[in-house]
Image (tube, helix red, strand yellow):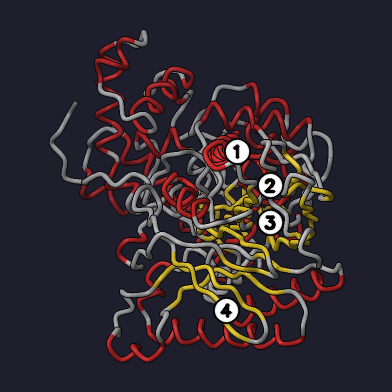
Amino acid sequence: MSDDRLRIALAQLNPRVGDIDGNLEKLRDARRRAAAEGADVLVCTELAISGYPPEDLVLKRAFLEAVETAVHALAADTADGGPAVILGAAWREDPETRQAHEDGRTVYNAALLLDEGEVKAVRAKWDLPNYGVFDEKRLFTPGPLPGPMNVRGVRLGVMVCEDVWSADVTECLEENGAELLVVINGSPFEEGKLDQRLQLALSRIEESGLPLVYLNQVGGQDELVFDGASFALDGHKNLGMQLASFEETVAVMTWERDALGDWTIAEAPRVNPAEGLEAVYRALMLGLGDYVRKNGFPGVVIGLSGGIDSALSAAIAVDALGAERVRCVLMPSPYTSQASLDDAAEMAELAGARLDTVAIDQAMQAFDGMLKPLFDDLPPDTTEENVQARIRGIALMAISNKFGPMVLSTGNKSEMSVGYATLYGDMAGGFNVLKDVYKTQVYRLAHWRNQQRPADAKGPGGRVIPERILTKAPSAELKPDQTDQDSLPAYDELDDILSCLIESDMGSRQIIARGHDAEIVGKVWRMLEGAEYKRRQAAPGVKITSRSFGRDRRYPITNAFKG
């Protein structure tokens, strides 16, 4: 490079948490690709060597030592004169203090500069997030406000993720001579997050006058999905580089210094990122696919009922894994309509997935006989309905145990919110792809998928969900002529109230002021709070909103507050 030209390679990769050797090989491969394209420096994401977020693995001394070994191995590679590497890692800056820090609590979440065979510079994350899904203050020590790194004669202001949210870090870097801001991230996907990141970057550029590169990882990690969608803006706030969403890539961009001494983007890739329903659908695909792949399951098994939730779950599973790894099971009872039988069969045929049938009549009769001495002549109620759901859960778990696929539960966020789900029944499973998807959005996603096929989908094009599934009234079919609205408000109304309670943390008065009936608001509030014990026992699922159930929303089970 010359003093007026810098080629930066961005490694938008999908690491696996804890797979330090595997992640190291990914990074080495990225560096080889960057070298082949003449890059001066390869930039990698937050905690790229360990995968993000590593959570309490950071507290293990053996884990930290394995990270350090891998970092030094990658640093040694840079003695070949090829690209330098900027790398995120959990880092104990002074190895001599290891014996004093057995619990790992003095570890930094750091950006490291590797060049000329060694670790040239360390910049620790200053602003440790401790909200929502983030819990970094219990794991890491905050670093001082950072200064720039000198990379091949250019002063790069490197920040780690949350640091870009603070004007203080940018100001410190600018005052200390940074020429170009580089942010390495592990930023989870949420609806609308792309615009939020872009506006944040524009604010930092407005304050400093410096161009900015925003690099984000990609991939699923338990309930989180990282969408990549990395980008770069010049000092005039022009978007000069944009990488794809939900895809691994190593991309090289060329920066040049103009006559005024400002760095501009001379050459870079531009790809339109996924937005709206496409982004949500692909996030669900990636979250489910990586959960299955990274945990070594051969596939999934789904209870296919003929309803919208199991149909959309099956469509996503086929798109994420391929039809050969999706096994659907129809488990009819005497209350299952012929329409549901036909719709489930058509759904499996359209998706190309295997469909088995396991009738539950005999098991229902057996349970009725077993419990009759205890129940005597008490009339049937939700007890018998729950028994049906639990019989189906047992059947699915038996198939999982016998053949290996993970049970994919199919409840949506509306149902999980109000407890319209049966513990150890339809809640049984290892993962729930719709856990953070409201019922109204389930329908929107299903309509979208019938019209569009994601570019990375393994499933078929064209219509994959039967039309009647989209138009008939939703029902659990646990008793004659049952519909969801026998016990729930209309889903448009329910979902708006739930969004007010969950995402916006509104009180009853505020929600009623939006035009909702006070009695219905009170009922929904009671159902939401009363179902907390169920949600604590629910399978993990993909986070797509700002407030998913789990680490995002931590409410007590024993709770007398009623708003």
Q: Can you tell which mark lies on residue 231?
A: 2
Name the residue type under label 2. Answer: Phe
Percent of width and height locating residue 271: 79, 43
Please indicate whether residue 40 sits to the left or right of residue 499 in the image.
right
CA gap, disc 1 and disc 3: 37 Å
Please indicate whether residue 226 sits to the left or right of residue 540 in the image.
right
- Residue at 57%, 29% in the rendered image: 441
Q: Can you tell which mark lies on residue 401?
A: none
Of badges 2 and 3, the one in the foreground is: 2
Of badges 3 and 4, the one in the foreground is: 4
Q: Residues within 10 Å of mark 2 (few under 14, many from 20)?
A: many
Reading the image, the residue beneath label 3 is: 326
Q: Does label 1 or label 4 sit earlier along the sequence?
A: 4
Residue in the foreground of this view, choosing between 348 and 120: 120
Outermost residue toward the front in this view: 260
Reading the image, the residue beneath label 1 is: 198
CA gap, disc 1 and disc 2: 9 Å
Q: Does label 3 or label 4 sit earlier along the sequence?
A: 4
Name the residue type under label 4. Answer: Lys
CA gap, disc 4 and disc 2: 26 Å
CA gap, disc 2 and disc 3: 35 Å
